[in-house]
Image (tube, rainbow, N blue to C red):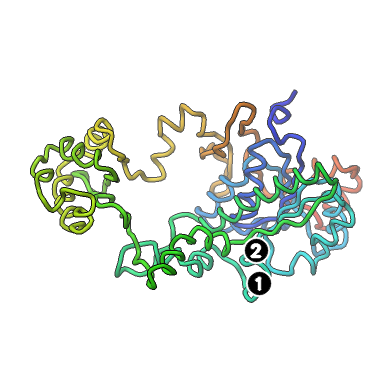
C-alpha cells in the first residue's frame, strides 16, 4: 500500500480548475486527506497567484501542496478535449472561474455531466444565483457586504479586512462539505450533482447572530476590536516588550478573583465598581484601562504563564512566523515540510496541514507544491496519450512543461 492509499480519500480523483484561494483551498483539503488532485492551469501564467509577488507565491505554495499541475490551453479544441478526458474519469471537479466562464468554454457542469453522470461538480462563486448572481466575487467584497468588515477593527477607525482570506476559505469549507455530502449521496443513487458554494452567503451566515442582534434591538452593534460585548476584561493588552501583546479573557466569576490574585492586584478585587459581572460591564472602560496599566509592566511570557496557572484563558498574540516554531504544532504533527517556488528557485518551506484526525482519519503531506505544468506529461500518459500525442500538444502550445517554457 502506498502512502496515499492509506489515507481516507485515496480512492477519490479531483480535477481543480482554480485560481487564488477558494478553489485551491477546497481541493487542498481533499488532497491532504488522500485524494489525487490534478490542478489545471493556463499555459504561460498559471494560477493568478504565481505572478502576484511574494504573498502570491506563498498562497500557491501553501495551498497547492499535494497536487499535480498540468498546463492546458482550454481556449483550444484539443485542450478542451483533454480536459474532458480528465473530467470524464474524475470523481470531483472544482472550479472558481467567473460567472458563466466555464459554460462558455464548454467545460461547465452540463457539458461534463453528459460525459460522467457520477461527477460531483463544485462551483465556487461570489454569490448564489439571484440579484447579485452576475457580480464578480472577491474576499473583501464578501467581507464588506456581509457586515464582517463593519464589525472588524475598533470603533471610529473604519472597516477592516480580516488578516487572511477568510471568506474565500469559508466558501471552500462549505464547498467541501457539499462535495462529501454529494459523494455520500452518490453511493446510494449512482448519480453525481452540481454543488454551489459562495463567498457572500458563507460570510453572511457567520454574521447571522449579529443580524439577529440588530433585529432584536433595532440597531447594529459597533465594531468589537479585540473585546467581547458580553464580558469585561476580555481584550488584548500590550506588555513590557514593544509591540508584544497578550489576550486575556475573564468570563466567569471564578476568573475575576483568580486574575486579581495572579497579577497581585487585591485592590481591583476590592473595588465595588468591579464586584459583579454586571458592574464590570458597566465600568468596562475603567477596568480595561486599569488592567492595561498593570499589564504593561509584565513580561509577555511571564504574564501568560501566571494567568494560565490561575486557570484564566490567556494567549500570546503571535506573529505568523511564530507558528513555524510552535511546540504544540510540531509535536502534534501539524507542521509539514515541502518544496515550493520563491523568486524563480525551489526552496524548502513549512506550513500547517489540514487539522483533521480520528480513529481512522488522518491527513498527510506527500507532494511538493508543483511548478506550472510539472505533471503535464505524466497526467496525460495516465489517460492514454502516447508520447507522440503529447509531443504534438507541446509543439502546438496546448500543454506546457516547466523546462520548455
In the image, 63 versus 236, the foreground residue is 236
- Under circle 2, the secondary element is strand
Instruction: Locate residue 9 relative to residue 299 in the image: left or right.
Output: right
For label 2, the crowd category at 10 Å Cα-Cα, with few meaning under 14, some 14 to 19 and many 20 or more, is many
Instruction: Locate residue 118 relative to residue 32 in the image: left or right.
Output: right
Residue 120 in view, yes or no? yes
Q: Residue at x 20, y 36 (%)?
A: 258
Q: Which residue is mark 1?
A: 133
Q: Are marks 1 and 2 in contact (CB under 8 Å)?
A: yes
Q: Is residue 1 above or below residue 225?
A: above
- Give x and y (percent) for residue 84: 85, 54
Asked which quadrant contains residue 250, the reply is top left
Which comes sooner in the sequence, label 1 or label 2? 2
Instruction: Locate residue 27 relative to residue 221 in the image: left or right.
Output: right
Q: Residue at x 87, y 58 (%)?
A: 78
Q: Is residue 238 above or below residue 197?
A: above
Q: What's the mark number on residue 55?
A: none
In the image, 260 versus 342, the foreground residue is 260
Asked which quadrant contains residue 157, the reply is bottom left
Q: What's the mark number on residue 125?
A: 2
Q: Is residue 62 above or below residue 348?
A: below
Q: Residue at x 62, y 41 (%)?
A: 65
- Give x and y (percent) for residue 209: 45, 60
- Give x and y (percent) for residue 312: 28, 38
Amino acid at each position: 500500500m502506498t502512502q496515499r492509499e492509506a489515507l481516507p480519500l485515496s480512492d477519490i480523483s479531483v480535477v481543480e480548475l482554480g485560481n487564488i484561494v477558494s478553489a485551491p483551498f477546497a481541493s487542498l483539503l481533499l488532497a491532504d486527506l488522500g485524494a489525487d488532485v490534478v490542478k489545471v492551469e493556463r499555459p504561460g501564467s498559471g494560477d493568478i497567484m504565481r505572478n502576484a509577488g511574494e504573498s502570491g507565491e506563498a498562497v500557491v505554495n501553501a495551498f497547492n501542496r499535494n497536487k499535480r499541475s498540468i498546463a492546458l490551453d482550454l481556449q483550444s479544441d484539443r485542450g478542451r478535449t483533454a480536459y474532458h478526458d480528465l473530467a470524464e474519469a474524475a470523481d470531483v471537479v472544482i472550479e472558481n472561474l467567473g460567472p458563466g466562464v466555464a459554460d462558455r468554454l464548454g467545460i461547465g457542469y452540463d457539458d461534463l455531466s453528459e460525459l460522467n453522470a457520477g461527477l460531483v461538480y463544485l462551483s465556487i462563486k461570489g454569490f448564489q444565483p439571484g440579484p447579485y448572481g452576475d457580480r464578480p466575487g472577491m474576499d473583501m467584497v464578501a467581507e464588506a457586504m456581509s457586515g464582517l468588515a463593519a464589525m472588524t477593527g475598533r470603533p471610529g477607525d473604519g472597516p477592516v479586512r480580516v488578516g487572511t482570506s477568510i471568506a474565500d476559505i469559508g466558501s471552500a469549507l462549505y464547498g467541501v462539505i457539499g462535495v462529501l455530502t454529494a459523494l455520500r449521496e452518490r453511493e446510494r443513487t449512482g448519480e453525481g450533482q452540481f454543488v454551489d458554494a459562495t463567498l457572500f452567503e458563507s460570510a453572511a451566515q457567520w454574521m447571522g447572530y449579529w443580524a439577529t442582534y440588530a433585529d432584536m434591538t433595532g440597531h447594529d452593534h459597533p465594531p468589537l476590536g479585540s473585546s467581547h460585548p458580553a464580558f469585561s476584561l476580555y481584550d488584548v493588552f500590550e506588555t513590557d516588550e514593544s509591540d508584544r501583546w497578550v489576550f486575556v479573557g475573564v468570563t466567569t466569576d471564578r476568573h475575576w478573583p483568580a486574575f486579581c490574585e495572579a497579577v497581585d492586584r487585591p485592590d481591583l478585587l476590592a473595588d465595588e465598581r468591579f464586584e459583579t459581572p454586571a458592574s464590570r460591564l458597566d465600568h468596562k472602560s475603567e477596568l480595561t484601562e486599569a488592567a492595561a496599566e498593570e499589564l504593561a509592566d509584565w513580561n509577555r511570557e511571564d504574564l501568560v504563564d501566571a494567568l494560565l496557572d490561575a486557570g484564566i484563558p490567556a494567549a500570546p498574540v503571535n506573529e505568523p512566523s511564530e507558528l513555524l516554531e510552535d511546540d504544540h504544532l510540531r509535536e502534534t504533527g501539524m507542521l509539514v515540510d515541502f518544496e515550493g517556488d520563491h523568486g524563480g528557485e525551489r526552496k524548502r518551506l513549512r506550513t500547517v496541514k489540514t487539522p483533521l484526525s480520528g480513529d481512522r482519519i488522518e491527513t498527510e503531506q506527500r507532494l511538493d507544491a508543483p511548478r506550472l505544468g510539472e505533471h503535464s506529461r505524466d497526467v496525460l500518459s495516465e489517460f492514454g496519450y502516447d508520447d507522440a500525442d503529447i509531443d504534438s500538444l507541446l509543439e502546438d502550445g496546448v500543454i506546457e512543461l516547466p523546462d520548455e517554457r
